[in-house]
Image (cartoon, grey):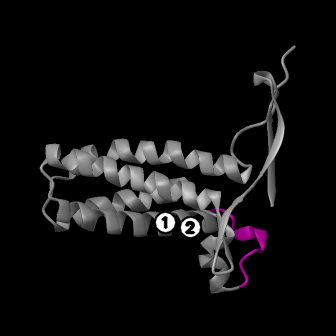
Amino acid sequence: MQTTVSFPGLGIEEFSFSRVAFTLFGKDIYWYGVIIMFGVLAAVLHAYLRSKREGVKVDDLLDLTIFIVFFGVLGARLYYVATTWGGGRYDSFIDVIAIWDGGLAIYGGILAGMTALIVTALIKKLNVFRVLDMVGPGVMLAQAIGRWGNFCNGEAFGYEVATT
């Protein structure tokens, strides 16, 4: 699988690269997943650096991370499935959960991740607004990094525009 791109306005001619970063135990690992994971790690690192200023213990941050990431991925997949249900691509439960075949939507990830953040913060008796302040910029950082994963997939970067 090759992605071909060009930037004619910048003088960069057409070039191609593989969507597969590497193969592990016979399974292709795509650049999209690798880059998304770097985005998540950057967000967690940013939250860790902010946690001291916001008075959140590292143990609480790790609990938040587990729930936010798990429910964020779950929400991203469910949102994608809900918005593409009519296409006839889901013949079984495995088809619905098959994130390895692609299909995540950031809207569902943000909604489910934020819900998990609020619920977890309330259960742990943390100030929800402080936790949102701690996590919010990292989410934007992760989104900015993750968009490069879309680029490697050859999606979500727009169309060539001709000017007259």
Viewer-side residue, 143 vs 130: 143
* Residue 57 image position (x, y, % from top left): 14, 58
The residue at the point 58 percent across, 46 percent down is 147
> If the image is split into quadrants, where does the N terminus sit?
bottom right
Q: Residue at x 35, y 41 (%)?
A: 137
**Where on the picture, by quarter, is residue 14?**
top right
* Residue nearer the viewer, 9 or 80: 9
Q: Residue 114's mark?
A: none
- Asked if marks 1 and 2 touch (Cβ < 8 Å), the reply is yes
Which residues are the magenta region?
83-91
**As displayed, is residue 152 above or below residue 33?**
above
Amino acid type indicated by mark 1: Val
Helix, strand or loop for disc 2 = helix
Describe residue 143's horizontal placement relative to residue 157 as left or right: left
Q: Mark 1 and mark 2: span between their CA atoms?
A: 6 Å
**What residue is drawn where x is 63% and y is 76%?**
98
Q: Position of residue 117 (x, y in %)?
A: 30, 60
- Residue at (58, 61) in percent of width and height: 33
Query: Residue 32, position in %: x, y?
Result: 62, 57
- In the image, taking residue 63 as reference, residue 69 lies left or right, namely right
Residue picked out by circle 2: 77
Query: Which mark identifies residue 73?
Result: 1
Q: Find residue 84 and report its image quarter.
A: bottom right
In what quadrant of the picture does the C terminus appear?
Answer: top right
